[in-house]
Image: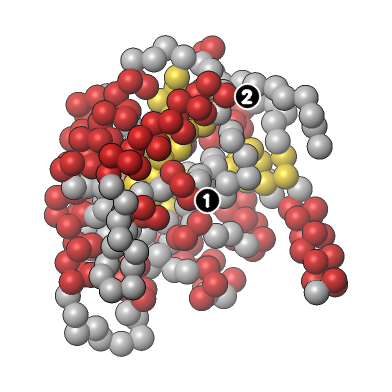
Amino acid sequence: MNWESENYPWPDGKKAAVCLSVDVDATAPYLWQTRAGSPKTLAALEHRNYGMRKGLVRMTNMMDRIGIKGSFFVPAIVAEENPELLPGLLARGHEVGLHGYFHEMVAEISDQKFTDALEGSIELFVSQTGRKPEGFRSPAWEMTPHMLAELARHDLWDSSLMGYDTPYTIGNVSEIPVRWDNDDAIFFKFLGAGDKSPRPDREVFEQWRHEADAQIRDGGLFMLTVHDWISGRAARVEYLEELFSPFVDDPDVWVTTCGDIAKHHRGIKGGVNVDLNDLLAVQKRSQQHG
């Protein structure tokens, strides 16, 4: 353990960074969950369809108004069904990253199926945009040693784990960390019976505002993750604009994309570097004592 705290070297004298990321899940999780049979209900499907019909446009228009670029993580099936999506986001200056093919849950697929899904997603992105994607975010924010090895093999950065406040390296992959409590789904996702009631919008956005201010004072990264079908509603987009507008005007804050953060991280020396073998050794010792 290093008890000496050093500030992360953000570029151009910036003291902290802020990133708005959007997981464009749309109907992909629904398709994955219902792959074994034909569903006879429409409510959840229509709820998710809202994002591609209205929510995503409202979000990108807001980003244009305040002058920020977002990081959009798109399952390949969503891009396949909406072929204008990836080129449209790139044309507006945003970045697009991988997010599974059908938003596959890691615990439900084999290593080979992950590799197949990753390579199929890359192929689709290249065919639609003419360029290879540079980043990945795992559905449900889970990761395995095989997945990290595959990301390294394809020279992809990742934004799925939460082991530090600033970018770090794990298994030779640049990691742009996320956090569950900076994700709209855990507060607002509601698809009917069995889901907990959504939290009040103002309460959650005030929590995020405090977290962002604290991370900025501490020299860290404030990464917010939202979803097209959840936070694309009018009131929540207004709150997003209210939250991010002050960062744009703050000369000490770098408002940027995951990809630009990853490029910067790869170019600096030092920083936290997690040895994957050390993590696996801890797991092995735990299993031996189990």
Q: Nearer the viewer, residue 70 or 242?
A: 242
Determine the image quadrant of residue 279. bottom right
Residue name at image x 36 percent, y 52 percent: 187
Point out the tag, 1 or 2, that comes first from the N-terminus.
Answer: 2
User: Quadrant location of the N terminus?
Assistant: top right
The residue at which mark 1 appears reads as 160
Q: Label 1 to label 2, Cα distance in Å? A: 20 Å
> Depth check: 111 or 49 in front?
49
Classed neighbour count for the residue bearing mark 2: other residues with Cα under 10 Å, few (<14), some (14–19), many (≥20) = many
The reply, left or right, for residue 144 in relation to residue 205 is: right
- The residue lying at 77 percent from left, 60 percent from top is 280
Horizontal and vertical percent for residue 101?
Answer: 40, 64
Q: Residue furthest bottom?
A: 37
Q: Is residue 234 left or right of residue 116?
A: left
* Amino acid type indicated by mark 2: Tyr
Can you say whether 91 is above or below 5 in the image? below
Residue assigned mark 2: 8
Picture quadrant where residue 242 is located: top left
